[in-house]
Amino acid sequence: MSGLFLARNDGSDFTASALAAAREAFSAQSFPAAVEHVLPGWSLLHFPYIIGGPDGLLVRGEEVAAAAGTPVVDGKFGKAALEALLGMDPLALDWRRIGGQFVALVRRNGRTFLFGDYFSAFQLFCDTGDRLFSTSLLAAAGAMPRLSFDPQGVYELAFNVMPIGDDTVFNELKTLSPFAVIELTDKGIVRHRIDKPLPAAPSHAPLAEQIERHRAPLAAIVGAYVAQFGNHVRSPLSGGLDSRLVLAALREAGCHPELYVYGLPGDDDVEIAQAMGEACGFEVAWTDKYAETPPPDAFPELVARNFHQFDGLPTFGNIFDNGGHGEAQRRRHAGGALAVSGGCGEDLPQLLLPARPPLHRA
């Protein structure tokens, strides 16, 4: 992915120290050098993709569009998507035209706006004093003169993998709400509230019509990625419904991704994925992420590397493991490949399958 960092440019020492801390933090994560752009009242750092990916910065006279993540607009990815964003009013976005997980900055008609994707799945961190915005937690933390732990945020991270709502583990840092668009001005910011209403009632349309209604936007997004990366895509395959839906969407778009499965020998996911590959005629690479055990004296360096690679966010303990998750991530993106995964596949059967009596252990 690429990265964005913005610091309030008010003539104080904070701006220079924050930008220096951001460059150091992004560099530790192997990002290339940033492109700096000065906006009224703000300094922007745009960090290109570490490897692969299109250019995420478009400057056209006084107009600027910058993105981190994978925005798709009107079925287009990369520069064409940024061009399309420049033609939209950030306070009245047509979300039927927009997909992907991203944070975007758009300057048009003399005004500058900052916003995320529909659900803010791609996080943007901001301080409570409205002096900085960052797609990297470590960059935001490094730029702050003082931080203190939020006990509730730490509790939720430990037991829920991530804090709930807009909180982080620090009192002084929050995340951008999906219901907010930030306007950056020469005097600070203006928070604009935006609505994203969901359907008020279940649809009673025929099943085929409902399936097509969901398939079409997914196909437009996946098609944009395939147009950019072709078959240079890596995707997991397991017993989960989400991974099979992703594979079907990729294949429908004409992509034949490199498939892999993680797990221990004999795991259901491994056996199901390999059986599917054998039946359908494609190879499924298997990786046992727990096969290697680093020696104790190598563990401090390994933890430090994981810490920066995962931006200080230890989902399911990845920072303190044997390095298997970090190595798997590097393999997924080797050569600039696009890594595509599903999500919530374990929940869909509970929602879609008919009601069944509960299972009881003997």
Image (tube, rainbow, N blue to C red):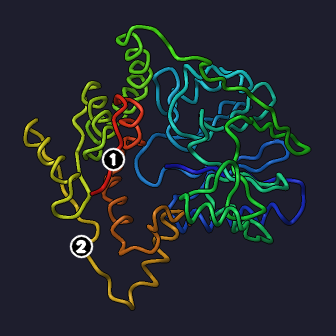
For this orientation, the residue located farthest to the bottom is 297
Instruction: Give the class, few, some or many, for how many residues have Cα within 10 Å of label 1's Cα (few <14, many ≥20).
Output: many
Query: Which quadrant is home to the C terminus?
Result: bottom left
Q: Where's residue 280, x and y in %?
A: 10, 35
Q: Quadrant of residue 95?
A: top right
* Tag of residue 291: 2
Q: Are marks 2 and 1 in contact (CB under 8 Å)?
A: no
Instruction: Give the class, few, some or many, for how many residues have Cα within 10 Å of label 2's Cα (few <14, many ≥20).
Output: few
In the foreground, 216 or 143: 216
Q: What amino acid type should be assigned to the residue bearing mark 2?
A: Ala
Residue 269, compared with residue 27, is above or below; it is above
* Tag of residue 120: none
The residue that appears at 41% across and 22% down in the rendered structure is: 220
* Tag of residue 337: 1
Residue 341, compared with residue 118, is above or below; it is below
Q: What amino acid type should be assigned to the residue bearing mark 1?
A: Ala
